[in-house]
């Protein structure tokens, strides 16, 4: 991180605190939200020098000089900058720079990101790109080295492979804070040597091991996974999940993002069971550009947590000091205190949590939702825009599923669960006409296809999905398809599916909605097929066109594009699709789409 841990001489801060050296910026007369003690202290001043807090107390007038900038708090609350404990920048469809530009006005001054999306496309060079861009941001962007690329070996083939050597190399890089979410929990509990080598390398480096345990039973498997060293988990969805993780010494990361809303249930472990709130963190995992523009980022999460009965100071602790202590950076951030970076928000009302002013690393960064900082856009190599590799255009015939069974056939169908990452494994009867299995709009079943976009094989796997609610002749295609990020297509007929897939290939990646053979929504994501090179406002408008396209096709899901993107996520139960076929995640095996 730029300037991180580079405070080699504390004498200037001491001189400022003592009044011997003028401050660069003084914030006067605020109500200090002291997260380290749980207090709110009125009539507080803060003196800032060289991006760090030099003095915090009742009167900083002794630190004023001729060139000192003064910011009147006017009794507004002084809140530490907010930290997102777990997220993937790529899921926002923005580059690191544009993501920071979008969330900084909302009070996010630190993010802990796992770039396993781009790692699945480009491998270690893709991670290096993200790390280098993170290092030049005006806020703290920490990177966790992706641990599972591919996420489930043997069940999918990604665009690249990352192993122990790559992990060990990356752990030595500046800006790497730890190991990304360990999704391959079967390998952990079964003692896989390569996975445990990654865990050991991280432990020996003194860095954080990120967790990912999506199963809801608290059996011996869960205990074995915890013994492997995972220090946090964001996959819990229930009160019981939260309790179990906290008791095993894992920080409970409660996510509230564009599509996954897991705070309300898990926070009951604190509000009703009385568990220690310092074991709980808040995160987004993930937030797309439309949400950042219309709702907010970590400020939105904090507001929601407060609405669920958390005292405001506890909710703020879960987005500041708790996160900083977990990742071992509380000497640098997560609280307003001497020596820490001056990441400070001016908030008018804690319950409504409207962020009016953002100070990041001692600089006035945003006021009333508008940026005050200038950003440099990094140059990227040409290869990042050439990631969709289809040997030839697809046709409607490529999406036809033949069978000799008549008039109906039993099919294994992926069932979407609104606002949650898990899916259901459904068994449904689908109609057969002219030797082909067709989608069934009356049962809300659409056809699903996954096309290899990494290796140029043109291989296509077919399945079915329930829950989109399509009522029109339509299709949606996306190269955002966690975690291997092949080309996913869902639709009600094969002609529209072919059009959608080919349009995606033409623009180098993104999401496209086609209705009655006409494109009605599109967001282009040329950077790895995952990210746009445009500002957040532009991407948000394009994403809204895609979401409106879903609605025009009859879909009423909240953020259905994100629901679509997880249909290939073969590390979360119950049923998914990969380039190997239909994956039963509860049994970790490939199963047929059609039952004989």
Image (tube, helix red, strand yellow):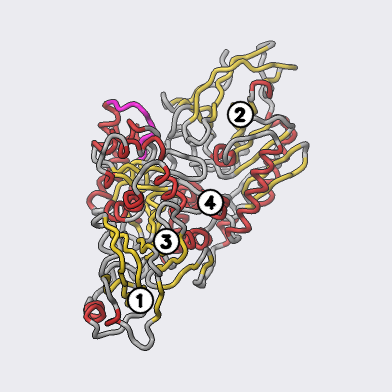
Q: CA distance from mark 3 to mark 4?
A: 16 Å
Q: Is residue 247 above or below residue 324?
A: above
Q: Which mark is residue 347?
A: 3
- How far apart are labels 1 and 2 at the CA level? 62 Å
Identify the residue at the far bottom of this view. 66
Label 4: which residue?
295
Sequence-earlier tag: 1 or 2: 1
Q: Bounds of the magenta span?
A: 212-219
Q: Nearer the viewer, residue 401 or 61?
A: 61
**Residue 479 placement: quadrant:** top right
Q: Nearer the viewer, residue 152 or 59?
A: 59
Contact (Cβ within 8 Å) of mark 1 with mark 2 = no
Determine whether label 3 and label 4 are within 8 Å by CB: no
* Residue at mark 1: 26
Q: Residue at x 38, y 86 (%)?
A: 67
Q: Earlier in the sequence, mark 4 or mark 1?
A: 1
Disc number for residue 218: none
Q: Looking at the image, is mark 4 or mark 2 nearer the viewer? A: 4
Q: Are marks 4 and 1 in contact (CB under 8 Å)?
A: no
């Amino acid at each position: 991180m730029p300037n991180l841990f580079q405070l080699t001489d504390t004498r200037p801060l001491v001189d400022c605190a003592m009044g011997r050296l003028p401050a660069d910026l003084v914030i006067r007369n605020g109500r200090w939200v002291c997260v380290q003690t749980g207090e709110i202290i009125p009539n507080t001043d803060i003196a800032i020098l060289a991006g760090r807090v030099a003095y915090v107390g009742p009167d900083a007038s002794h630190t004023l000089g001729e060139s000192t900038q003064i910011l009147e708090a006017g009794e507004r609350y002084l809140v530490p900058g907010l930290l997102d404990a777990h997220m993937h920048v790529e899921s926002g469809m923005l580059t690191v720079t544009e993501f920071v530009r979008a969330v900084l006005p909302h009070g996010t001054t630190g993010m802990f990101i796992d770039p396993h999306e781009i790692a699945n496309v480009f491998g270690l060079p893709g991670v290096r790109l993200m790390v280098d861009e993170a290092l030049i941001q005006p806020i703290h962007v920490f990177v966790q080295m992706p641990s599972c690329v591919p996420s489930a070996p043997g069940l999918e083939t990604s665009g690249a492979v990352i192993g122990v050597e790559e992990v060990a190399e990356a752990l030595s890089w500046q800006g790497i804070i730890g190991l990304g979410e360990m999704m391959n929990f079967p390998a952990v509990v079964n003692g896989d040597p390569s996975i445990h080598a990654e865990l050991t390398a991280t432990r020996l480096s003194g860095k954080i091991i990120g967790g990912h345990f999506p199963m809801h039973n608290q059996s011996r498997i869960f205990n074995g996974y915890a013994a492997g060293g995972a220090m946090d988990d964001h996959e819990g969805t229930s009160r019981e999940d939260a309790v179990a993780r906290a008791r095993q010494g894992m920080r409970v990361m409660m996510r509230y993002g564009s599509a996954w809303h897991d705070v309300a249930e898990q926070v009951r472990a604190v509000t009703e069971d009385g568990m220690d709130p310092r074991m709980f963190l808040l995160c987004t995992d993930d937030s797309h550009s439309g949400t950042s523009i219309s709702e907010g980022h970590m400020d939105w999460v904090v507001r929601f947590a407060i609405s669920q009965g958390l005292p405001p100071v506890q909710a703020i602790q879960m987005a500041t000091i708790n996160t900083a202590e977990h990742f071992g950076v509380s000497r640098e951030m997560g609280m307003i205190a001497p020596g820490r970076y001056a990441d400070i928000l001016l908030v008018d009302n804690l319950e409504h949590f409207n962020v009016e002013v953002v100070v990041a690393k001692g600089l006035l960064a945003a006021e009333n939702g508008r940026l005050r900082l200038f950003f440099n856009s990094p140059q990227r190599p040409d290869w990042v825009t050439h990631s969709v590799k289809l040997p030839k255009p697809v046709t409607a015939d490529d999406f036809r599923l033949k069978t000799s069974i008549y008039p109906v056939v039993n099919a294994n169908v992926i069932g979407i669960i609104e606002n949650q990452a898990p899916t259901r494994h459904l068994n449904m009867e689908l109609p057969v006409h002219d030797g082909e299995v067709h989608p069934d709009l009356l049962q809300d079943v659409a056809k699903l296809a996954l096309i290899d976009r990494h290796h140029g094989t043109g291989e296509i796997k077919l399945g079915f999905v329930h829950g989109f609610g399509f009522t029109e002749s339509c299709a949606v295609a996306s190269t955002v398809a966690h975690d291997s990020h092949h080309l996913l297509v869902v639709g009600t007929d094969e002609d529209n599916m072919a059009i959608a897939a080919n349009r995606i290939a033409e623009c180098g990646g993104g999401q496209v909605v086609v209705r009655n053979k006409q494109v009605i929504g599109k967001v282009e994501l040329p950077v790895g097929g995952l990210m746009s090179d445009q500002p957040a406002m532009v991407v948000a408008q394009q994403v809204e066109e895609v979401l409106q396209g879903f609605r025009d096709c009859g879909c009423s899901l909240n953020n259905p594009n994100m629901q679509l993107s997880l249909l290939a996520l073969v590390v979360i139960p119950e049923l998914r699709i990969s380039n190997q076929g239909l994956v039963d995640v509860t049994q970790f095996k490939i199963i047929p789409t059609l039952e004989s």
